[in-house]
Image (spheres, grey):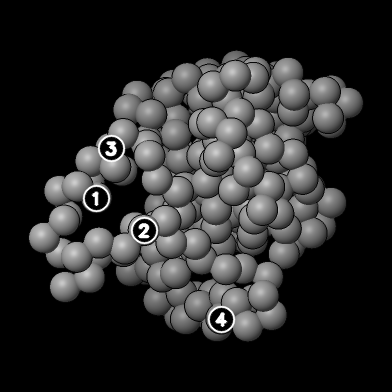
Amino acid sequence: MFITYQTAYYALHRRATVQSGDVLLVHAGSGGVGSAAIQLGRAAGARVIATAGGPEKVRICKDLGADVAIDYLAENFVDIVNDVTKGRGADIIFDPVGGDTFDRSRKCIAFEGRLLVIGFAGGRIADAPANHALVKNYSVVGVHWGLFRRLMPERIIEAHRRLMELNKQGAIRPIVCKEFPFEALPQAMELLATRKTWGKLVIKP
């Protein structure tokens, strides 16, 4: 809850100023921060589109509240986002993947949209052409929650209280893929590295 939901909350509410009615595209929607972003987007009144790899992870995104869930292994998310938004695109794109996903996201972002740079799970740090940002009038927005936590700790306390309220209301529910004993840590890391997990893994001492 502390890292994944705080990161998603900071990204959506402070960096992207999410509003009710916004179209939010969440990449890696079945992952830790992605699953948090889906739920927090829904709680804020956004229309949520999520991407994930494979039918099982797509189902998880739908169960979490995504209005539309896309299997990026079998479908072109750019075409689907533009289709369901009637060509307008997504107001907010939550991208913890980077690389090719970031490049393609620029093709389905709305005018005055916000493309959130959460991380680089895809392995490549993408470039952001300034001319394209100018033409479509969108923002590429960095999300460094760790630095924010150190600079503004009082905001972290405030956000955590809000997250606890949302949890009590049932608006968010952290998902645990599997629990491991500490000696199985290498096995858990291998599952993460090969993208065979969803939500969070828990290691018990």
Q: How many marks?
A: 4
At label 2, which amino acid type do we have? Lys
Q: Position of residue 67 (x, y in %)?
A: 77, 45
Q: Is residue 122 above or below residue 49?
A: above
Q: Can you identify the residue that label 4 sits on?
A: 164
Q: How far is the residue under mark 1 from the one under mark 2?
A: 9 Å
Q: CA distance from mark 4 to mark 2?
A: 23 Å
Q: Mark 4 or mark 2: which is in front?
A: 2
What kind of element bears circle 3? helix
Q: Nearer the viewer, mark 3 or mark 1?
A: 1
Label 1 packing within 10 angstroms: few (<14), some (14-19), many (20+): many
* Identity of the residue drawn at 54% across and 22% down: 73
Residue under pointer 2: 178
Residue corresponding to mark 3: 193
Amino acid type for the residue under numbered disc 4: Met
Q: CA distance from mark 1 to mark 4?
A: 28 Å
Write down the quadrant of residue 80 in the picture: top right
The quadrant of the image that shows the N terminus is bottom left
Give how far apart the Cα atoms at labels 3 and 2 are: 15 Å
Q: Which mark is residue 188?
A: 1
Mark 3 to mark 1: distance in Å? 9 Å
- The amino acid marked with disc number 1 is Ala
Q: Secondary structure at mark 4?
A: helix
Question: Where is residue 112, by image quadrant?
Answer: top right
For the view shown, which residue lies furthest in the right direction?
86
Q: Earlier in the sequence, mark 3 or mark 1?
A: 1
Labels 4 and 2 touching (C-beta < 8 A) = no
Say which quadrant the C terminus sits in: bottom left
What amino acid does circle 3 point to?
Answer: Ala
Q: Secondary structure at mark 2?
A: strand
Q: Residue at 72% of width from left, 58% of height from top?
A: 42
